[in-house]
Amino acid sequence: MAHPKRRQSSTRRDKRRTHYKIEAPQIAIDKTSGEAHLYHRAHWADGKLYYKGKVVLEKVQEVTE
């Protein structure tokens, strides 16, 4: 049975054990606004903040005199 001559570092061991890969984020299309956005995230469209197809917040225009 093979024996390593030197002890392997924890960093090197952890690099070998990683199995995660870079993946593209899941993108959803909002039914109300038609905008593409990340799942479970609020997004701005036409000056309104949408979450789950509902308007959560509207952008307030400041009046300068």
Image: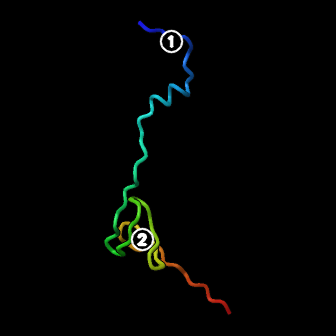
Which image quarter holds the C terminus?
A: bottom right
Of the residues under marks 1 and 2, which one precedes in the sequence? 1
Amino acid under label 2?
Answer: Tyr
The residue positioned 40% from the left and 54% from the top of the image is: 25
Q: Is residue 5 above or below residue 15?
A: above
In which quarter of the view is residue 21 placed?
Answer: top left
Q: Outermost residue toward the left?
A: 31
Name the foreground residue: 63 vs 26: 26
19 vs 48, nearest the viewer: 19
Q: Residues within 10 Å of mark 1 (few under 14, many from 20)?
A: few
Q: How far from the left and from the top, in percent, is residue 29?
A: 34, 67
Dot 2 falls on a residue whose secondary structure is strand
Identity of the residue drawn at 38% across and 59% down: 39
Label 1–label 2 contact, CB within 8 A:
no
Residue nearer the viewer, 47 or 7? 7
Q: Amino acid at mark 1?
A: Pro
The quarter in which the N terminus is drawn is: top left
Which label is found at residue 4?
1
Left or right, 10 with reference to 37 = right
For disc 2, the marked residue is: 50
Secondary structure beneath disc 1? loop
Quarter-of-image position of residue 38: bottom left
Q: Is residue 14 above or below residue 31?
A: above
Q: Is 54 left or right of 49, judged from the image as shown?
A: left
The image shows residue 65, relative to residue 8, as above or below, that is below
